[in-house]
Amino acid sequence: MLQQEVDPTTQTLREFALSLVRHAPPSSLSRVAAGVLSVLERQGPQRITILAERESVSQPAMTGLVQRLEAADLVERRADPADGRAALIVITVPGLDALTARRHSHDARLASAIESLAAADRAALEAALPALTHLLESYESA
């Protein structure tokens, strides 16, 4: 199979995103658990099927994760007002606290890496922030 040539910007951004995931600071939250809590924080209560789709896992796997998050008091189930037979998963205050702690840890590691860069590189990153923000918005809406 021939490898398709990728432009350096695409390749670097992909590798950077993967590195952020691979080198996430140790936490009691898995990447998928943190992703679920983040979705619940940003988008509000969700059904398990939506969470499973969003995190690209099976519904039974998501059900198991939600049960573990419930047992840890990080999420709770509430009746879906649109369908009494269904439940919505809601992030709790301890869930928000755990997510915030994970983010602070991640931010500290990233800030340390940025601080180790030369001033010119830090300035270039700062100048690129509007473009990176637009890229993120475009990527997430695609």
Image (cartoon, rainbow, N blue to C red):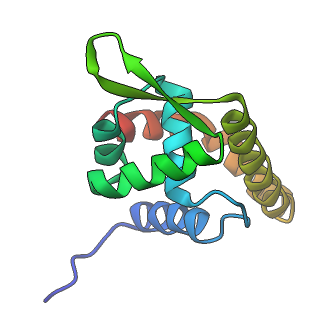
Figure quadrant of the C terminus? top left
Q: Which quadrant holds the N terminus?
A: bottom left
Whether residue 132 appears in this view of the structure is: no
- Rendered image quadrant of residue 9: bottom left
Q: Is residue 99 left or right of residue 30?
A: right
Say if 132 sits above or below 117 in the image.
Answer: above
Residue ID at (26%, 75%): 5
Of residues 64 and 15, the one drawn nearer to the viewer in this rendering: 64
At x 54%, y 59%, the residue is: 31
Residue 38 visible at all:
yes
Residue 73: horizontal and vertical position, in percent?
65, 40
> In the orientation shown, which residue stands out farthest toward the bottom?
1
- Image quadrant of residue 119? bottom right
In this rendering, would 8 be left or right of 119?
left
> Between 132 and 64, which is closer to the camera in this rendering?
64
Extreme residue in the left direction: 1
Instruction: Please count the marks in the image.
Output: 0
Q: What residue sits 58% from the left and 60% below the top?
A: 30
Up/down of 137 relative to 44, above or below:
below
| x and y, in percent, of residue 25 in the image | 73, 64
Residue at (56% x, 42% y) in the render: 70
- Residue 140 x, y percent position in the rendering: 38, 38
Question: Is residue 40 shown left or right of residue 88?
Answer: right
Percent of width and height locating residue 88 = 40, 26
Against 6, residue 85 (above or below) is above
Q: Nearer the viewer, residue 118 or 86?
A: 86
